[in-house]
C-alpha cells in the first residue's frame, strides 16, 4: 500500500485534461504529505460530482513563495504540463504562501464514474473534500473496488 492515498477535488475542465494526457501536473496552494508512488483518487467537483479515476504521483515540488519572481520560476517548471494559462496561473497563486506541483503518471479513468449519490449509497459517510483529504485504510479498501 502506498504511504499516502489522497482524495482530491478537481474542477471538471482540469480533470478532463488529466485523463486526456494534456495535464501532467496538478497545482495546489496547500502543502501535502504526498511522495513518489502515492495514489490520488480524483473526485470531479460540481456540476459533475463524481469519482472518476486516479493517478500515481511521480514527483512533487512544494516550495514557499517569497517573491513575485518565484511565481515565474515555478511557471517555467510547469507551463507545458499544467493545462493552464500564465494569467490564470498567476491569479491562482496571488497571495499564496506555497507552490505545490504534483507531477502525475498513469492516470486511469474508471470505466464508469461513480456519482455522489451512488458513492453515498456504497459509503454512507462519504463527503467530498473541499480541496483534498487523506483516505484512511478502511476507506481505501472501499475505494479499491472502483479501481
Image: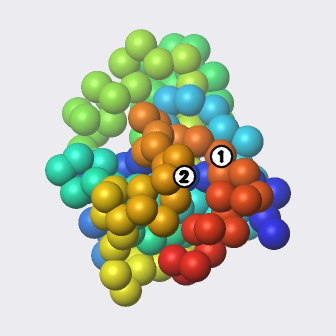
Give the structural element (helix, strand or loop) at label 1. strand
Q: Position of residue 6 (x, y in %)?
A: 61, 52
Q: Is residue 135 left or right of 36 when viewed as pictured?
A: left
User: Visible in this render: residue 9?
Assistant: yes
Q: Is residue 11 left or right of residue 120?
A: left
- The answer, for residue 25, to whether it is visible in the render is no
What's the colour scheme?
Answer: rainbow
Q: Which residue is mark 2?
A: 7
Q: Is residue 132 left or right of residue 142?
A: left
Residue pictured at 73% horizontal, 42% vertical: 33
Few, some or many residues within 10 Å of mark 1 (<14, 14–19, 20+): some
Secondary element at tag 2: strand
User: In the current view of this chain or complex, which residue is farthest to the bottom?
Assistant: 111
Is 104 rendered above or below residue 69?
A: below
* Nearer to us in this view, 32 or 48: 48
Residue at 46 percent across and 43 percent down: it is 127
* Image x and y of residue 106, in percent: 55, 78
Q: Residue furthest left?
A: 47
Q: Residue at x 47, y 19 (%)?
A: 96
The foreground one among 118 and 98 is 118
| 43 lies above or below 100 | below
| Contact check, label 1 and label 2, Cβ < 8 Å | yes
- Depth check: give the residue in front, 10 or 78: 10
Estimate the spatial distance between the alpha carbons at disc 1 and disc 2, rounded to whole Å: 6 Å
Please tell me which of labels 1 and 2 falls first in the chain: 2
Residue under circle 1?
134
Amino acid at each position: 500500500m502506498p504511504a499516502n492515498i489522497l482524495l482530491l477535488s478537481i474542477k471538471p475542465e482540469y480533470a478532463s485534461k488529466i485523463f486526456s494526457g494534456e495535464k501532467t501536473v496538478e497545482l495546489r496552494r496547500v502543502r501535502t504529505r504526498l511522495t513518489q508512488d502515492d495514489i490520488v483518487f480524483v473526485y470531479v467537483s460540481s456540476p459533475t460530482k463524481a469519482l472518476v479515476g486516479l493517478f500515481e504521483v511521480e514527483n512533487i515540488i512544494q516550495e514557499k513563495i517569497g517573491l513575485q519572481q518565484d511565481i515565474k520560476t515555478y511557471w517555467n517548471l510547469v507551463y507545458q504540463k499544467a493545462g493552464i494559462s500564465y494569467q490564470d496561473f498567476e491569479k491562482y497563486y496571488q497571495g499564496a504562501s506555497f507552490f505545490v506541483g504534483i507531477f502525475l503518471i498513469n492516470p486511469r479513468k474508471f470505466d464508469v464514474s461513480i456519482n455522489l449519490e451512488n458513492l453515498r449509497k456504497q459509503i454512507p459517510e462519504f463527503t467530498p473534500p473541499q480541496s483534498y483529504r487523506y483516505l484512511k485504510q478502511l476507506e481505501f479498501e472501499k475505494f479499491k473496488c472502483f479501481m
